[in-house]
């Protein structure tokens, strides 16, 4: 299905309201995306880490055999991106404790020649100018979707607007959509973004699900009502992984196909939050995914 993701691989420290915490666990947008996408098919990973990237995290990535990590560059003399956060009691809000860019402050990784025939591309969160450059390296893309964050909206809005003229879709959260467009209503914000170029926008609202603003219609899906919430880190990235992998697997880029892809993304994310890091995804079986999807489909009349 030639799905490729470019983004970050990091080392995370996470504190949760119930007093649990984990230090030095595998994180980063590309790590979560790749793990989730591999539950549906093969995925190519392009990212960069420093020479301090531990073997235990390489072993974790190896637990997902459908992830082709040959595009993971280990840069001598550099340090891996590190991030730490503390979640508030509602688990939707968090306080960032530290961000050490490390290798992310250097030149981005290069897309391997063997990856340049990829047809489905997800540009996970990074500077929009870097995302645009990576997009230009992939001439055969059928579907390109980007993620972004408040930092780039604040510091590089022109680069982000330039990127949006070239991609098919954008995934971002409610606060980011409001920040970028100035519209508090997510539908109005989504329509504003469509005017800039994308065919669709997925606006995430955490425990309240996600909204699809598409040139052919609107749709809203709830989050799956998960009883166990341990660590929300990476939920959005695994949503994107399931979403893109389903589209790459089926090739159905219609409005209904994208809506179904959102449901698959929702289901993968509902498993991710049950543990820290990629632990739950590493143990997840296809039949468990299908069972929860079937339950969700009945709840939402997806058919």
Image (spheres, rainbow, N blue to C red):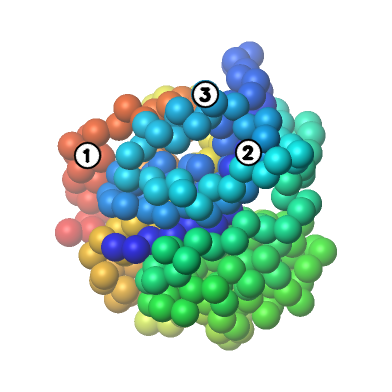
Q: Earlier in the sequence, mark 1 or mark 3?
A: 3
Could you tell me which secondary element the residue under label 1 belongs to? helix
Question: x and y percent of residue 63 in the render?
Answer: 37, 31
With respect to residue 125, does 213 lie above or below? below
Label 3 environment density (alpha carbons within 10 Å; few <14, some 14–19, many ≥20):
few
* Residue 239: x %, y % from top left: 44, 50
Are the residues flagged by discs 1 and 3 in contact, CB closer than 8 Å? no
Please say whether residue 214 is visible from this viewpoint. no
Horizontally, residue 119 falls left or right of residue 277, namely: left
Q: Is residue 84 left or right of residue 275?
A: right
Residue identifier under label 1:
286
Residue in the image at 57% along x and 77% along y: 136
Residue 175's image quarter? bottom right
Q: Quadrant of the N terminus?
A: bottom left
Tell me how far mark 2 sits from mark 3, CA to CA: 13 Å
Residue 158: x percent and y percent?
76, 77
Label 1: how many residues lie within 10 Å, few (<14), some (14-19) or many (20+)?
A: few
> Of marks 2 and 1, which one's residue comes earlier in the chain?
2
Q: Is residue 52 left or right of residue 265?
A: right
Quadrant housing residue 54: top right
Residue tagged 3 = 56
Numbered disc in front, either 2 or 1? 2
**Contact flag, marks 2 and 1 (Cβ < 8 Å):** no
Residue pointed to by mark 2: 10
The CA distance from mark 1 to mark 3 is 25 Å
**Residue 284 location in percent, x, y?**
30, 32
Q: Is residue 202 above or below residue 140?
A: above
The structure residue drawn at horizontal position 46% and vertical position 49%, both measured from the top left corner, is: 70
- Dot in front, 2 or 3: 3
Q: Is residue 166 visible?
A: yes
Residue at figure coordinates x 68%, y 30% from the top left? 52
């Amino acid at each position: 299905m030639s799905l490729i993701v470019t983004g970050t691989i990091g080392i995370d420290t996470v504190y949760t309201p119930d007093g649990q915490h984990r230090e030095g666990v595998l994180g980063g947008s590309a790590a979560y995306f790749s793990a989730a996408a591999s539950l549906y098919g093969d995925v190519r990973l392009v990212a960069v880490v420093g020479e301090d990237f531990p073997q235990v995290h390489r072993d974790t990535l190896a637990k997902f055999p459908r992830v082709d990590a040959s595009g993971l560059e280990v840069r001598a003399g550099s340090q891996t991106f590190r991030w730490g956060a503390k979640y508030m009691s509602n688990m939707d809000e968090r306080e960032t404790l530290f961000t050490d860019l490390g290798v992310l402050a250097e030149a981005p990784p290069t897309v391997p020649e063997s990856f340049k025939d990829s047809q489905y591309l997800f540009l996970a969160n990074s500077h929009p100018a870097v995302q645009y450059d990576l997009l230009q390296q992939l001439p055969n893309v059928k579907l390109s979707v980007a993620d972004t964050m408040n930092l780039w909206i604040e510091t590089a809005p022109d680069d982000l607007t330039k990127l949006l003229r070239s991609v098919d879709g954008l995934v971002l959260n409610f606060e980011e959509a409001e920040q970028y467009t100035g519209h508090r209503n997510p539908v109005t914000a989504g329509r504003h973004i469509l005017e800039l170029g994308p065919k669709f926008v997925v606006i995430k609202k955490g425990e309240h699900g996600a909204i699809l603003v598409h040139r052919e219609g609107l749709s809203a899906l709830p989050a799956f009502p998960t009883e166990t919430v341990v660590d929300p880190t990476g939920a959005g990235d695994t949503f994107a992984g399931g979403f893109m992998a389903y589209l790459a697997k089926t090739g159905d880029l219609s409005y209904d196909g994208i809506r179904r892809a959102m449901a698959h993304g929702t289901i993968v994310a509902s498993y991710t939050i049950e543990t820290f890091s990629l632990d739950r995804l590493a143990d997840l079986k296809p039949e468990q995914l299908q069972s929860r999807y079937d339950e969700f489909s009945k709840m939402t009349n997806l058919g």
